[in-house]
Amino acid sequence: MVTLQARRAWEAAAAVLDPEVPAVTVADLGILRAVDIDDQGRAVAQVTPTYSGCPAVLAIELAIEAALRQAGFDPVIERVLAPAWTTDWITEEGREKLRAYGIAPPVAGSSSKRALFGEITVACPRCAARDTSKLSEFGSTACKAQYRCNACHEPFDYFKCI
Amino acid sequence: MPAAGVAALIGLADDHLILGHRLSEWCGHAPMLEEDLAMPNIALDLIGQARALYSYAGDLEGAGRDEDALAFGRMERAYRNLLICELPNGDFAQTMLRQFYFASFMQLFWQEAERSSDATLAAIAAKAVKEAQYHRRHCAEWVIRLGDGTDESARRMAEAMALLAPYTGEFFIADPEACGAVEAGIWPDTQALQPAWQADVEQVFAAAKLVPPASVYAQKGGRSGLHTEAMGHLLAQLQFMQRSFPDMTW
């Protein structure tokens, strides 16, 4: 029955919304790595931060803990660093939810090979135009940059690629 | 399991805490809104990296010191940060050049540390390297924009370079606390990173039409706890709350 319990625990934890981008869940973002039931019957949730300095990490951990407790589990939160989170951990469903919410999802693939001033094409989440320009490499949260659509003139957040 | 030395980890953590604190001083004072977001964002990354390193150092030490005790509870001479991290911000050009020098170095450092036989250090590095790359790119763009900008911005960038270049030599002086760990494949050999760093910064300076000083005497002392005049003032602000209300929590 452990596997059934583990699945129930996963479902409870996975439904927690990101506090800064409440359109997606911690599972969509790939921040929640696993939930297992240990030999003492506790629900051990493995959580990884997006950015080293993401101030939402503690809030996310507390929310997962509360969700597990509410589902009748004795929760333990384990912070894991490896393998490091990248934007590739965001699920396909998560990317669609971000787009629907007005945040352009990260352009697929790692940014590491991009050279100085290397520009990427970010499609507007509202009108899908590809003619957009970068306003700022840093945005309202650690994980976002600011862009503007040159077609519909809407400014929008881009979930930046790391 | 191989592990990095506590003192070397604390030195690396101090670099990030102190520079992160310096950068955070720009919050609300940057020349434009975008940079007012950028600098505290970079500062947050640096302080996040410092927290991971302090926590790990505290665990290894096993003396009950946590990240807060290490960040806020030491005297000036116990801080082992590189001197460049504690220098006052100066103007925007000086801050951006300092950040570019540091991010370019840390990108190379973390790339090596990712291959460390210390699994925790490697995990911290794997995260930090992506952040350092992002910081480096952002700051390099500013170095180019200001260096190849107006007469005034170019003059300010040249002045910043004259001031900061002597502090970059300290990046590559081997930390005596990490010597054994370098040979054991735990800690990056910082001396070996110099050619790659040199090539990286020179390529950006060429695009920025900036001429770096030919050779400069390296200012050093941070890793031995010998700091500049600026450090005491910085700590007075950084430690104020914990000194006034020891062990306070929010």
Image: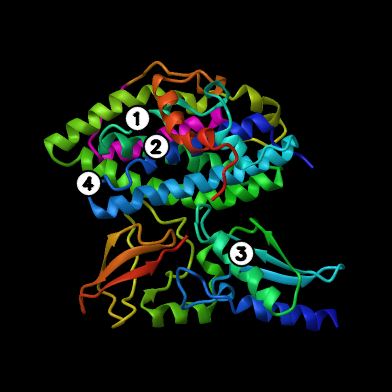
Range drawn in magenta: B188-213
Q: Which chain carries label 1?
A: B
Residue holding disc 4:
B31
Q: What element carries label 3?
A: helix
Query: How far apart are the alpha carbons under marks 1 and 4?
Result: 17 Å
CB of mark 3 within 8 Å of CB of mark 4?
no
Residue holding disc 3:
A61
Looking at the image, is mark 3 or mark 4 nearer the viewer?
3
In this orientation, which residue lies closer to the viewer: B40 or B8? B40
Query: How far apart are the alpha carbons under marks 3 and 4?
Result: 36 Å
Mark 3 closeness class: few <14, some 14–19, many ≥20 residues within 10 Å: many
Indicate left or right for A85 with B234 as reference: right
| Residue beneath the point at 46% across and 82% down | A96
The overriding secondary structure of the stretch rendered in magenta is helix
> Does label 2 or label 4 sit earlier along the sequence?
2
Residue holding disc 2:
B22
Magenta span contains residue B85? no
> Does label 1 or label 4 sit earlier along the sequence?
4
> Does label 1 or label 2 sit earlier along the sequence?
2
- Residue B88, disc: 1
In this orientation, which residue lies closer to the viewer: A136 or A92? A136
